[in-house]
Image: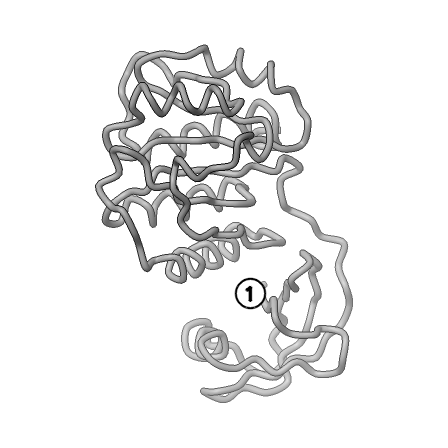
Amino acid sequence: MPRIFLPSVDLHDGPVSIKGEKAKYLSAVLRCRPGDRLLIYDNDGNAYSSKITGVTAREVVVELIEKMDRNTDSPLHITLLQGLLKGEKMDLVVQKATELGVQEIIPVVTERSQLRETRKIPRWARIAEEASRQAGRNSVPRIHQTADFEGLPPGPPANGVIFWEQGGDNLRVVLKQCGARGAISLFTGPEGGFSEKEIASAAEKGFLVATLGQRILRAETAAITAVAITQFVLGDLGI
C-alpha cells in the first residue's frame, strides 16, 4: 500500500485534499487511481488507512477509513550529530540514518569540515521524508539547522558518544555504559575526522570516546556503521 506523510494537514475533518508535489507523486509516479488504498501518516506518527476518491494532475482527494495501530519507529531515540560532509556524502548519511531509525540529525561544522555552511537543509528534509516513506516509518527525522562545534551546548542532548579513529573504547563497552535509557547521541566526524582538541572538548561536555575498530572508515561509512551497531545493541535492529 502506498504511503505518504501529511504533517501539516488536519486528518480528522472530512475528505483530505493533497496538492503540490505529493499530488504529482501519487498521480504521475505511482499512477494512483480512484478506489486505490493509501496509508497516510500525520505529524504525530499516527497512521490512517484511506481510499482515493479523486485524482487530477494537481490534486488527489482521499477519504479516511480508520486509524491504524501501526508503529514501526525505533524505541531508541538516536540523535546523529554529523560533521558536515561535502557533495553527496551527506545525502547518503541522511538517507541511510533515516532508514535505520534515527530521530534527529544535526549537521555540525568542525575544525576539519571542508564546508563551512550549507543551503541543503530543505534538500535533506526531503531525502529524510522519502527514506521514511520507503522504510515504512511512522515519522520523519528532524533535520536541524547547521551548528558550530564550539557552539554546542555544554552537555550532550542525551547519552553522548563521539567516534575517533585514533583511540577510544570499544563501542560495545561504551554502549553498555550508556545503557538502554531510550535516548543516545552519536557524534561522527567529517572527512579527516576530529582533532585532538575537539575530542578533548567533547569529553569535557560529557561525550564518551569510542572507536569503530582498527580500520579507518570513510566518514559516511562510519556514521552508518555507528547507527547500525547502536540500533543492534540498544534498539530494535535484528530483534
Query: Which amino acid is tagged 1?
Result: Pro
Q: Which residue is labeled 1 in the image?
A: 2
**Residue found at x 67% / y 37%:** 75
Measuring from the top left, give residue 86's x and y in whole percent.
24, 46
**Residue found at x 63% / y 53%:** 138
**Front residue of 14 and 90:** 90
Q: Is residue 156 left or right of residue 217?
A: right
Q: Is residue 160 left or right of residue 167?
A: right
Placement of the N terminus among the 4 image quadrants: bottom right
Placement of the C terminus among the 4 image quadrants: top right
**Residue found at x 31% / y 54%:** 118
**Residue found at x 31% / y 26%:** 194
Considering the numbered disc 1 on the image, is that residue within a helix, a strand or a loop? loop
Q: Is residue 122 left or right of residue 215?
A: right
Residue 4, by quadrant, is bottom right
Measuring from the top left, give residue 208's x and y in whole percent.
50, 18
* Placement of 116 over or under 211, stated as above or below: below
